[in-house]
Image (cartoon, rainbow, N blue to C red):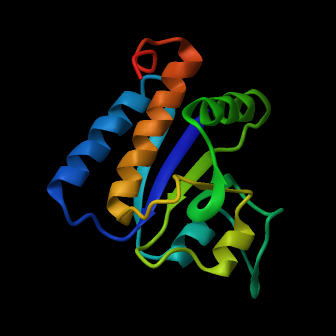
Amino acid sequence: MKIKIVWVGKTKEPAIQSLTDEYLKRISRYVQVEGLALRDEAALLQMCGRVTPGKASKSAGKSTLVLMDSGGKQLSSEELARFLGDYFDRNPLPLVFAVGPADGFSEAARNGAQHTFSMGRMTLAHELARVVLLEQVYRAFTILKGHPYHSGH
């Protein structure tokens, strides 16, 4: 089981980097995880094997791509946990969660993703969205493992 959490652009705030590192460390207790900053959307699509001559392809790939996008499906923490549990029960490919640039993902990226999830209807700064995603992935694994982290919500 492997998860990659990727984001487009450099981290500008030291506090964001600190929280990113903390949640990656926590997630690593449950699954192999990697956090990656990518220069642009094209690098994301190439990393996920979605680049074919002239177009993106949902069927090609070395991983399963999940875009975090305001137009995506909203999930509760429990639903995200079920998604992760089901995914790792049946799929050997790495799972890539991607937080886009400040102006969002292109149509090509949306077409290249197998899943598109939203963190809600509120607008979040993309660096903050990354931290929220990391916390929710960590929470999902604590739900799956019966850890008390989630029980106090």
Please indicate whether residue 58 sits to the left or right of residue 31 in the image. Answer: right
Residue located farthest toward the left when viewing the structure as drawn: 14
Location of residue 69 with respect to 135 vertically, above or below? below
Image coords of residue 85 (percent x, y): 68, 27
Q: Which image quadrant: the C terminus?
A: top left
> Which residue corresponds to the image point at 74% horizontal and 30% vertical from the top-left?
86
The residue sitting at 24% across, 53% down in the picture is: 16
Q: Nearer the viewer, residue 68 or 31?
A: 68
Residue plotted at (47% across, 38% down): 136
106 w.r.t. 87: above or below: below
Report the front residue among 115 and 55: 115
> In the displayed structure, does residue 55 sit left or right of residue 24?
right
Q: Quadrant of residue 65?
A: bottom right
Q: On the picture, is 128 further left or further right than 4?
A: left
How far across and down, in percent of the image, does residue 121 sit?
A: 52, 59
Q: Quadrant of the N terminus?
A: top right
